[in-house]
Image (cartoon, helix red, strand yellow):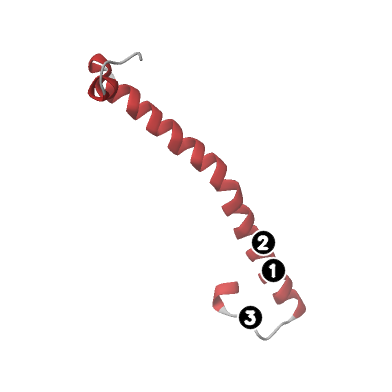
């Protein structure tokens, strides 16, 4: 194995803080890139459904749907 111990893997000769923080930032950005479109789609569909109900004159519209 490349590292002698788990501690050596974490510290990476003094560079571990930079390496692991770069990995963490990369994972967070990639997760945001994957999650954001789904959230935008849900929000858009909710808004579209509200607009359709309003255009039909549906009296059962709640504040959450607006």
Residue 57's image quarter? bottom right
The residue singled out by tag 2 in the image is: 45
Residue 46's image quarter? bottom right
Which circle's residue, 3 or 2, is located before the other in the chain? 2
SS of the residue under disc 2: helix
- Counting from the top left corner in percent of width and height, residue 60 is at 65, 85
- Counting from the top left corner in percent of width and height, residue 63 is at 55, 77
Identify the residue at image location x=75%, y=74%. Answer: 55
Q: In this view, does 51 lie to the left or right of 8?
A: right
User: Residues under labels 2 and 1: Cα distance?
Assistant: 6 Å
User: Residues under labels 3 and 1: Cα distance?
Assistant: 10 Å
- Counting from the top left corner in percent of width and height, residue 34 is at 56, 42
Between 54 and 16, the one nearer to me in the picture: 16
Contact between marks 2 and 1 (CB within 8 A): the answer is yes
Which circle's residue, 3 or 1, is located before the other in the chain? 1
The residue singled out by tag 1 in the image is: 49
Contact between marks 3 and 2 (CB within 8 A): the answer is no
SS of the residue under disc 3: loop
Between 51 and 28, the one nearer to me in the picture: 28
The residue singled out by tag 3 in the image is: 61
Identify the residue at image location x=60%, y=51%. Answer: 38
């Amino acid at each position: 194995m490349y590292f002698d111990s788990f501690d050596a893997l974490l510290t990476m000769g003094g560079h571990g803080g930079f390496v692991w923080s770069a990995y963490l930032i990369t994972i967070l950005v990639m997760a945001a890139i994957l999650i954001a479109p789904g959230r935008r789609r849900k929000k858009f569909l909710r808004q579209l459904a509200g607009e359709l109900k309003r255009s039909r004159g549906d009296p059962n519209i709640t504040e959450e749907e607006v």
